[in-house]
Amino acid sequence: MALKVGIVGMRGIGMAHADAHQSDELSELVAVCDVIKQRADEGAEKYGVKAYYTVADMLDGEPDLQIVDVCTGGMENGSWHYEPTMEAIGAGKHVLVEKPLSNDIEEAREMVAFATDEDVYLGCNLNHYFTEVAARAKQYVDEGDIGEQIYCLHKMGFSGGEPEGYKAPQAARVKGFPWFHAKAFLAHPFSCMRYFCGDITHVQAFCNRPGFRKRVEELLVSTLSIHVRFENDCVGYLISQRGDAAYGLGGWWSLELAGTKGTFCIENCIEKLTYWRAPSAPPRPEKLDTGKIEGPEIMDTGIADFGATFPRRIHAFLEDVTNGVPKEQLRGSGRDALATLEYTWAVIDSYENGGEIVRPNPIPILKGDPLTQND
Ligand SMILES: NC(=O)c1ccc[n+]([C@@H]2O[C@H](COP(=O)([O-])OP(=O)(O)OC[C@H]3O[C@@H](n4cnc5c(N)ncnc54)[C@H](O)[C@@H]3O)[C@@H](O)[C@H]2O)c1
């Protein structure tokens, strides 16, 4: 039976989630909520569901609701996630919340702990790796086609450059927040790196803002150059920038994971995957022989629209809840999202301490369920 869903926050992203729920047979959208009445009413009319103006009223008015999908934003795109999420968890509902979990690390830790205590699913919209190309790439990893992981190179950000007569953004969510880009966005690239390579144990960051931002005294730290080490000893590099420079190769984002048995590269997020098997004979660099490369294998989906990640990711959450998977197996969980925030805080810490190496706060251990895992 379809899961009854209510959405909180009915602007651009809330609408994208509503579209996904409406076209998913595992979901029955029954209510929408926004503190701005007009937005709730327009959403309710468009999707033929009931409008609410507070989360408390929605929870009271819809006792059969099973999932609350939190699509609010706020300062640094995350200051309005905590309250609706905690209210919904407190009412025993499963929650899917937009990224970042919060713009405050303490709140994010509390959200994850509260969902565990209340034994509900807390998922986060870490949508970037819910794609066909990422699924195939993960298969290469799981089936040994990458081998021992050597390095992971990830480039994810926004295309831009110096515009004529540049003016600093004035939106309340951005203005005056140096770490807006780090807090609002790094959940995406860090979640992709962690999906393929596992936990990050060391972080070192060098950051900057270009001259056109400095000249207007904008505080945004917009170029983030991040060097990491994973628990499995693989090393990695993430460059993320918010419109400081034009995209280069790989489009919206690219990720290359190289290993002793092979290497893959995802280009343009959802569009293309290339896999190169390691040369069967070792290279002889002293003879200028770089090794014989077979292939490569290419998967070209022809999909360039990143919007296609939303229904795929939301469907995965609905599937996991419908199937009642053990909480620790939830894909794109609150815990996964918390890990990305811990890395983000380590980036800030490293930069503010002159690029020193920071060990991110470990995410809470998995405790397991004595009712289902007692052997
Ligand atoms: N996963 C992705 O790819 C992706 C892409 C873009 C944005 N986002 C995230 O989506 C979220 C929403 O983005 P947006 O641009 O639609 O935000 P927005 O701020 O434009 O809209 C949020 C809406 O939530 C409402 N709201 C806030 N607090 C509320 C509350 N307590 N109860 C009811 N309504 C409340 C606001 O009135 C507003 O209409 C952000 O957190 C952003 O980071 C995710």
Image (cartoon, rainbow, N blue to C red):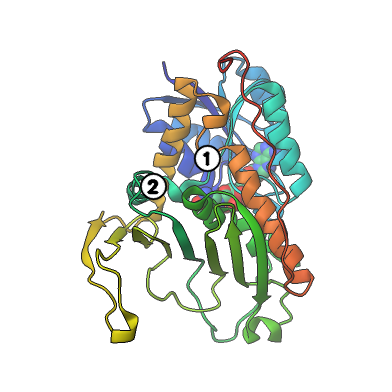
Q: Position of residue 364 (x, y in %)?
A: 70, 38
Measured along the vertical axis of the image, is residue 24 above or below residue 276? above
Measured along the vertical axis of the image, is residue 225 above or below residue 349? below
Q: How many residues crowd around disc 1 within 10 Å: few (fewer than 14), some, or many (20 or more)?
A: many
Tell me where residue 252 sits by quadrant: bottom left
Tell me where residue 186 sits by quadrant: bottom right
Of the numbered discs 2 and 1, the one sitting upstream in the chain is 2
Q: Which residue is mark 1?
A: 332
Q: Is residue 72 left or right of residue 151?
A: right
Q: Position of residue 300 (x, y in %)?
A: 24, 57
Please name the amino acid that badge 2 sits on.
Answer: Lys
Q: Position of residue 231 (x, y in %)?
A: 59, 52
Q: Looking at the image, which residue is at 73% across and 29% down?
A: 114
Q: Looking at the image, which residue is at 66% across and 51% down?
A: 341
- Say what secondary structure mark 1 lies in: loop
Viewer-proximal residue, 273 or 106? 273
Please name the amino acid that badge 1 sits on.
Answer: Gly
Q: Which residue is mark 2?
A: 138
Tell me where residue 55 sits by quadrant: top right
Residue furthest to the top in view is 371
Measured along the vertical axis of the image, is residue 349 above or below residue 82? below
Q: Is residue 20 left or right of residue 342?
A: left
Viewer-proximal residue, 35 or 187? 187
Q: Is residue 51 left or right of residue 151?
A: right
Q: Position of residue 213 (x, y in %)?
A: 66, 81
